[in-house]
Image (cartoon, rainbow, N blue to C red):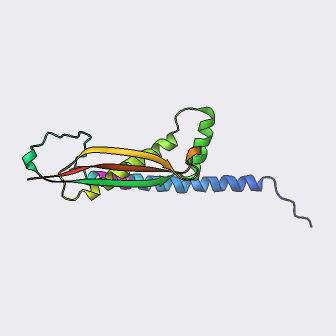
Amino acid sequence: MELIPNPVLFPALILIGYFICYLIGAGIEKNHYRSIKRRERSYRHLPAVTMADPKVDPDAIVGAELVCGNVVISIDLFKAMAALIRNLFGGRITTYESLIDRARREALLRMKETAVGASMITNVRIETAHIGQRAHKGFGTVEAVAYGTALMLRK
């Protein structure tokens, strides 16, 4: 008996695999956002501002240091395919917007985690970049770096 491939089987397997990638990617993103929100609440006491010259009495500053946090986050297969389809028709690519949002927020949190004993972080800057072999094609990963000056103030 000759083995004849079922023409529906291969596309069905592809769709099932695609759906599984979607579920796994969505779960990972949901857990990451949950972690970010929890950690943001715990660091509410530490303001991170963009102004370079805060209205602080210079005599109250007892220390200052550069603090930095960075993260590299990759896009999952489902989001990459959705972005590819969206590129064909134009418009906002919300799948990448959530990727960049997560990267920026995570980088800020990591920066705050390194600012042990600081009262505030001033002159905060955030840089993002696409990295990886396929970055020029819109795939790959995104890196976010947050940095600023942690000020230790006299209590």
- Give residue 78's position: percent from left, percent from top: 58, 49
Total tally of numbered discs in the picture: 0
Horizontal relation, residue 65 to residue 155: left or right: right
Q: Position of residue 84 (x, y in %)?
A: 61, 42
Q: Tell me the quarter of the picture where residue 39 sits.
A: bottom left
Seen as rendered, the residue at the extreme bottom is 1
Q: Which residue is drawn at 55% across and 54% down?
A: 23
Is the residue 98 above or below the residue 28 in the image? above
Front-most of residues 107 and 28: 107
The image position of residue 40, as x and y in percent, is 30, 51
Q: Is 10 left, or right, of 22 in this rendering?
A: right
Screen quadrant of the N terminus: bottom right
Q: Is residue 134 left or right of residue 111?
A: right
User: Can residue 77 be seen from the camera position used here?
Assistant: yes
Horizontally, residue 38 falls left or right of residue 86, namely left
Magenta-span inclusion, residue 83: no
Q: Give coordinates of residue 71: x percent, y percent.
A: 41, 54
Please tell me which residue lies in front, 124 or 25. Answer: 124
Residue pictured at 83% horizontal, 59% vertical: 5
What is the chief secondary structure element of the magenta stretch?
Answer: helix
Q: Which of 86 and 104 is in front in this view?
A: 104
Residue 36 falls within the magenta-colored stretch? yes
- Identify the residue at horizontal 73%, vertical 52% (top origin): 11
In this orientation, does residue 38 appear?
no
Magenta stretch: give its range.
34-40
